[in-house]
Image: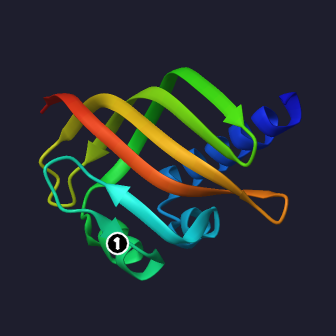
Amino acid sequence: MPNDNHQILTIHQAWMDAERYGDVQSILDLCSSEIRFFPPDRPIIVGKDAVREFLQSGSDSINEIEISDIYVEVSGSLAYKTAQYLTRLRASCDKGVTTIRGNHLWILGKESSQWRVLIVAWSIWQEEN
């Protein structure tokens, strides 16, 4: 399923670009209507409205995102993508840059021949100020 892998990696790149520019609507456009976020140490966030509120609640801006070790597995109309990330955030109150490292997992579903993100879960295994 090389074409599916390519489509999923294209979605991944569009998501990363949208994160860098703070474009919440473009992120939501890549998601199913019942998107579920599993942030570390927080309750599950369900649905586009709740995810929009969560994404807009952050006051830090992204300076840089580095992604490594991307792995995609497709099985019929479901797929998952894993990767490691390093994100550098600048606090809105100009307290410097925070670097966060972790892993993320996406589960995607094919809806009318279009892949959509169903679930996003991530871990933070290192945070530095």
Instruction: Residue 29 in the image: state x and y as whole percent.
Output: 63, 69
Which one is in front, 57 or 59? 57
Looking at the rendered structure, the secondary structure element under dot 1 is: helix
Q: Is residue 123 left or right of residue 71?
A: left
x 41%, y 62%: residue: 36
What kind of residue is marked 1?
Gln
| Total labels drawn | 1
Q: Quadrant of the C terminus?
A: top left
Instruction: Residue 12 in the image: state x and y as whole percent.
Output: 62, 43
Q: For the view shown, which residue lies furthest in the top direction?
A: 69
Q: Quadrant of the N terminus?
A: top right
> What residue is shown with label 1?
56
Q: How is the image coloured?
A: rainbow
x 50%, y 30%: residue: 82
Q: What is the quadrant of residue 60 in the picture?
A: bottom left
Q: Is residue 116 left or right of residue 10?
A: left
From the viewer's perspective, is residue 109 above or below residue 68? Answer: below
Q: What is the quadrant of residue 87 in the picture?
A: top left
Instruction: Residue 51 in the image: state x and y as whole percent.
Output: 39, 71
From the viewer's perspective, is residue 73 above or below residue 55? Answer: above
Instruction: Residue 93 in the image: state x and y as whole percent.
Output: 14, 60
Query: Mark 1: few, some, or many residues within 10 Å (few <14, many ≥20)?
Result: few
x 56%, y 62%: residue: 27
x 79%, y 43%: residue: 7
